[in-house]
Image (cartoon, grey):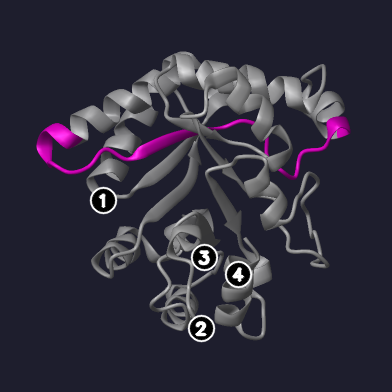
Amino acid sequence: MSINLAAAKRIMVALDYAEAKQAEALVRSLEGIPCYLKVGMQLFYSAGPAFVQMLKEKGYNVFLDLKMHDIPNTVKGGVESIAKLGVDMFNVHAAGGKQMMEAAMEGVDKALQAASGPKPIVIGVTQLTSTSQAVMNEEIGIEGSVEDAVIRYARLAQAAGLHGVVASPLEVVRIKETCGSGFVTVTPGIRPAGADIGDQSRVMTPEQAFAQGTDYIVIGRPITAAPDPRAALEAIIASV
């Protein structure tokens, strides 16, 4: 099957596994498809930096999804360690504020002074795609609409020097209108037509998300839990 390479590079496969062996089996099954690979908290805490380095040695682009959120100095130090791994993208919580996000960018610069390499894309988490309007208003304590909260965080992230944000595909058009077409959007909450939405609240299909103008889509369970993950990914690539 011929693979649309340009589309494959904009699809991030979430390696949401508890152990490196499970993730390695998935990576082997996808060999030859130049997708992005997303390493989240569970796998990173289990397998550590060595797993990320292994993916980089295999030539993959890696999104390290740790959603850093702490005092500015702590985030700066954490980012310095992350940047030295050579990851292509990582994220921090925009809710940490402008000073914290600026500290993250300082951490990147400091890391690259010690070890030359390409600058990673740094993105801010706006509102999780599992967050509904009711949860945001009644539990988190943020008034207004989810979309307005996302746009406020996107503006803040841009002012702090970040390259883009994580948001649901529903907010992509307004983010691009507000922050410009070059401001990167990474969109989780992607479910192929007919797939179970699981714990997500704000979702779209891959085709719909790209039609909104997003730069990258993140897909986990529809690929990783499929009987044939490679076939599932190839079908998604073909659909877009």
Question: Which numbered disc flags the more N-terminal residue, 4 or 1?
Answer: 1
Badge number at residue 85: 1
Q: Amino acid at mark 1?
A: Leu
Q: CA distance from mark 3 to mark 4?
A: 21 Å
Crowd tier of the residue under label 2, counting other residues whose Cα lies within 10 Å: few below 14, some 14–19, many 20 or above = few
Q: Do the residues bearing badges 4 and 1 touch, measured as CB atoms within 8 Å?
A: no
Examine the structure image and report whether residue 141 is included in the region drawn in magenta.
no
Badge number at residue 1: 2
Question: Which numbered disc flags the more N-terminal residue, 2 or 1?
Answer: 2
Q: Is residue 56 above or below residue 140?
A: below
Q: To which residue does mark 3 refer?
A: 15
Question: Which numbered disc flags the more N-terminal residue, 4 or 2?
Answer: 2
Examine the structure image and report whether residue 122 is included in the region drawn in magenta.
yes
Taking the spot 75% from the left edge, 45% from the top edge, the residue there is 130
Q: CA distance from mark 3 to mark 1?
A: 18 Å
Q: Amino acid at mark 2?
A: Met
Q: CA distance from mark 4 to mark 2?
A: 10 Å
Kindly report which numbered mark, 3 or 2, lies closer to the viewer in this rendering: 2
Give the structural element (helix, strand or loop) at label 4: helix
Give the structural element (helix, strand or loop) at label 3: loop
